[in-house]
Every structure is written in C-alpha cells, then in structure tokens.
Image (spheres, rainbow, N blue to C red):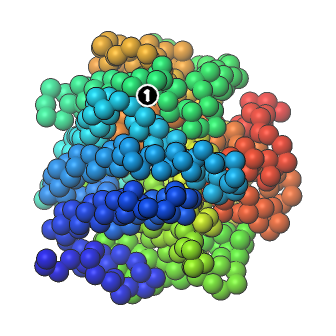
Amino acid sequence: MSYNPFLQPYHTPHNTFPFDKIAIEHFEPAILEGMRRENEEIEAIINNSEVPTFENTLVALENSGQLLEEVTTVMYNLNSAETSDELDDLVNRLSPLLSEHSSNILQNEKLFERIRKVYDLRTQFEGEEAVLLQKVYDNFERSGATLSAEKKERFKAIRKDLSTLSLQFSQNRLKETNVFRLELKSASDIEGLPESFLTQAAETAKEEGKEGWIVTLKAPSFVPFMQYAKRRDLRQQLYMAYNTLCTHNNEYNNFEIVRKIINLRLELAQLLGYSSFADYALKNRMAEKPEKVHALLNELLMAYRPTAEKEVATLTAYAQQQEGKDFCLEPWDFAYYSQLLKKELYDIDPEVLRPYFQLSKVEAGVFALATRLYGISFKKNTSIPTFHEEVTAYEVFDADGSFLAILYTDYFPRKGKQSGAWMTSYREQSISTDGTNHRPHVSLTCNFTRPTTKTPALLTFEEVETLLHEFGHCLHGIFANSRFQSLSGTNVLWDFVELPSQIMENFAIEKEFLSTFATHYDTGEALPDALIDKIVAARNFNIAYACLRQLSFGFLDMAFYERNTPLDADILTFERAAMSKSVLLPPPAETSMTTNFGHIISGGYAAGYYSYKWAEVLDADAFAYFKEQGIFNPEIAQSFRKNILSKGNTEHPSKLYQAFRGKEATIEGLLRRDGISL
C-alpha cells in the first residue's frame, strides 16, 4: 500500500491530524482498511471463549474502530468546512458503504448476544459503566438487533438510503446557494447599505471579475442586505431567492428528497415498534415524549404571542408612517423596518457597534472570560497542521498548567464551506485502562464578515453572540472528563446539548464583560457605557416575534415526525398548516422553509428542534444563578464545570442540572429575561 498519513504515526503536536499531508486520495483506502480492522476487532469479541464481561465485550466494543472513526471524522468535517466536487462525490460514494458497515455491526446477532448476557447482569453495575451498558444495549435494539432477518435487511436498506439522501439534501442546498448572485450596479441599488457591507460586496465582485457589488445568500451578505437595503424590490428578490432554495425545477430540487427522508424515518421507527419517528427519537431525550414537547411549545406560544402581535402591529404602523397607510408589511420588510425602528427607539445602529467588535479582540475577550471563570488559558501553536490557511490552532491549558485540549478556530465563509456556525470534535476525550486521559480536539467554525483591504474583520453584535454560543459548545468538549469516549463531552441527550452554548450568550449584554475587550479598532476608544446601556435596553426588541419564529420551526419539525402514516401531501401546503398558529407574517405561497431546513432534514435535529427552546429555559434559569452570585463568581463557574461541562452523558441531565442549580428549571426565568413578565 502506498504512503497514507492515516496509516502512519502522525508525529504531530498532541497527535493532531496531519492535515498538511492528507489528500483526497487517502480517504478511501484508509476507510476500507478501517472497516477491515474493525471487522477483525468485532470478530475477536465474538470469538472470545471467555464468559462475556463488561471489559471483554463492552469496553472492547467501545475501543474498536478507532482508525475508521478518525478517517471518517476528518472526511465528514472537511465535507462541511472545506469541500469540493471531488470530496462531495467521494462522500456520496462511501456513505452508503459506511452505513452498511455500521448496520452489519449493530445487527450482528452473536455480538448482541454477548451484550445481552452482560445486560442481564446490569444491576451489578453503576456509574459510567451502567450508563454505557444501557446506552449500548439501547443502541443495538434501536438499530434493529432484535428484528427478524427480513426486517433487518429492510432496516439496513433504510439507513443506507437515509445516509445518501441526507448528503444529497445538504449538497443541493450548498450548491444552489453558491450559484446565486445579485449584482448591484447603480447608486439606487446600494442606497441605505453601510460602508462595511459595500466594501465586502465590492471585493466579492472584484474577485469574480465584475464591476459594482455582488450580494450572495451567505449570511454575512444576506443578513445585512435585508436589514439595510432601501430598495424594496431588491429585498424581495433576495428574500425570494433564499426562501425558494431547492424548490426550483432543476437538479437541486429537494422536495422529493424531503418526502423520502421523512417517510423513511417513519418506516424505520415503525419497524422497531414505535408509532412515529418522534416517539422513537424522544425516547432518548429529556422531553421523553411528544406530549411534553407540545406542552413546552404551546406554553411558550401562549406566553409570547400577545406580545409578538403587538410588535408586528407597532412595526406595521411605523412602516406605514414612512410609506403611507396602504403599505402592507411583508416578510422581506421585517428586518429593514425593524432596524430603522430600533435605531429610532434606542438610538442604536448595529453598524455603529461593529467597529468596537474587532474579531481578534472579541476572540481575546471570550478567551479571557474562560480564563476568569475557569482559570484556563489559550496558546496559539503554529506547529499544529490545519486544513486551511485561515484556520488557527490553539493549545488549551488548565489552571494548573496541564494540557487540556486543542481548539481550532475557522471564522470566514468560503466556497466549499457550509453556511452557519457550528462546533465539532476531531477527537473525543476518553480515559484508557492505563489511566491515560486522552484530551479532546475541538473546532469552532463560523461564517463571519471577512476583513477588507480597509478594515480588519469587524463583527455585528449578533455575531458576537454567535461566537459566544459556539465557544460554549467548545467548552463542553474541552472540559470533558469521562472514562468512555461515547459518553464524553457533547455526547449528551439532544435537548440538553444547547445549555452550555446558550448560557454563554448571556454574557454578551453584561457591561462587566463587554468592557474587557470592546474598543474601537481605529481609535482605541472603549465602547461607551451609553452604547452598552442601549444594547441592553434594545436586547428584547421584537423578542416575542423571534420566539414565535423559533416555535414555528419546532411545530413544523414535530408535524413532520409525529406522523404515523406516510407523508403524501404537498410539502408547501403541509408546511403552511403546521406553522400557521405561530406565523404572523405569512410568506408567499411558493416559498419553502423545509427544502432549506438542514437541521431537521439532513442534520441531527429531526424531532428535536424544540431543544433550542428547551435549553433556553435551562440557560435562562442557570444564568439567573450566575447573576445572583456575580457573573464571574468562580465557585458557581466551577460548579457548572463540575456538574455540567465535564460530565458528558455519565448521568441523566435532570440530575446534573439539579446538582448545579438545586432545583428544576421553569420558564419563569426566560419570561423575566425576555421582558414578558416582571
């Protein structure tokens, strides 16, 4: 076999991936070798003549497939952060093979029999061992291990199809996003747009050999255009382009892919004896069943809708003052008139704030916050290979100076990068039998506005919140301290995973935090207290409308996945009905949320989008505790680290939260924070 970096010792700092040596052609042979090795490891477990024990069965299974996991982790992460047509094709080709390989293991009768024999003795185990045993048993059962031979084959085929379809959905979305260009030529085209936006748009045009300015559907371009562009027809054009992604009669159409994914998930759940995919998914969530999800969504809808209706009425009246009493507020108008009214009410313009949020200083401020709370420190290490020149690698050290983790940061949009922001792990934390604590390697990925020839990268306030959010996920990975990798870090129940991220967003409006880093990039002037006060005062502007928007996504998600019969209705019609009670500005009939809704179609949030609001209830309640004791209180921070961030999935989240907070969370903290109740 020719040289392959995956099959050699890495000889890199902290055994980080040798990205500088990894090429496309290395993935397939390494994956095939990884599958071969894992199959050998599974056979060794099965053929072990000793009585099945936790160590020779569960621990052996936990430790199997290391090479395959490393290679696929890099491949799939790059497919999100730095893909190409060649990598897309490779992933499309290998994903069904990988899905079949996984199904073969999870449906291996001899392996499951050994697991079952250990499971029969489950009362003898406690702590992490008991949790791992239950998780592995459930995973096999939920993956078809108890099905008949005929049903197992169908189960494997469904998983294989879902893997392929999910990739097609994501790739269609990215490719059609990349195709769109709105070219601006005249002074009237750019009226109202801030200088920072125009500089970026001009550079985009120049890169493509065009005159004028180019607007794309990537967030740093789309969002400010919708907020500031005075030309209503252009706002409408951009809105329609974004909200009809993958609905057109072309190769990127996602309608039938959506239908197939939803129906295949239903069939999979019913093969296993569940009424719906939501019942199947929620069994391993804090919410446990659809009724609890609807209870939360409806409780929030009742609490927030009256205020949201007032917000829309106020904005409509304001727009009519500007445009005439016959003006009808449309979805492409909301962001534009919102920023105008917000500026008028609070005398605050997001573009006035941007110069105070230089990315390098925001990052330093966020790192310093972690140092102040937890005593950890960050050191850039240029010897660590990265997969792109814009990616930076940091070593993270604990308060006692011991090595804690690797953190990669990747901040700017690229052609081969999915939109949005996310945290991911390149290596999970675990503790081997000899006591070695293998520390995690995590990545923070965003799509922030790039620096220009005139200015450094300057963030909006919302982007500061995004950075804090994803950094919270990173801390969850960085502080992981579990014996078993599959229980480590962010491998928690899905409706608990957003607590560590969302609690960090609360710091964004704390004067004590902002004053540590927010200075004007050019003059060095500190962010004035008056502006901070305005940020705080304006924080809840249109917050009820924003809540209803999130609830509408949650209702749509549940409507798709709590069905017990296949979906044969028109996707657009179904979508409208599902979201109707929480939508105050109905979109045009031809637009679709679903065809662009990666979270619930191709991502991990199927029957789980509610978890954002679920975790928001937790984070509001938890941050109230910080506020009571002081936002930098080291004792509260250490309790949060000990009881939440370091525990992973070693205990049920309800127990972890109560260990930190001393009580269960209610929505009252959220209602008070959002100004819905006093």
Relative placement, left or right, of 244 versus 658 is left
Relative placement, left or right, of 69 versus 62 is left
Where is the C terminus found, in terms of image quarters? top right
Along the line of sight, the residue nearer the viewer: 287 or 668: 287
Q: Residue 550 location in percent, x, y? A: 54, 32
Q: Residue 394 location in percent, x, y? A: 49, 78
- The quarter holding residue 85 reads bottom left
Residue beneath disc 1: 272
The amino acid type found where label 1 is placed reads Leu
Where is the N terminus found, in terms of image quarters? bottom left
Residue at left offset 73%, top offset 37%: 670
Viewer can see residue 355: no
Residue at left offset 52%, top offset 56%: 52
Relative placement, left or right, of 474 versus 644 is left
Q: Reply above or below: 160 against 565.
A: below
Tag count in the figure? 1
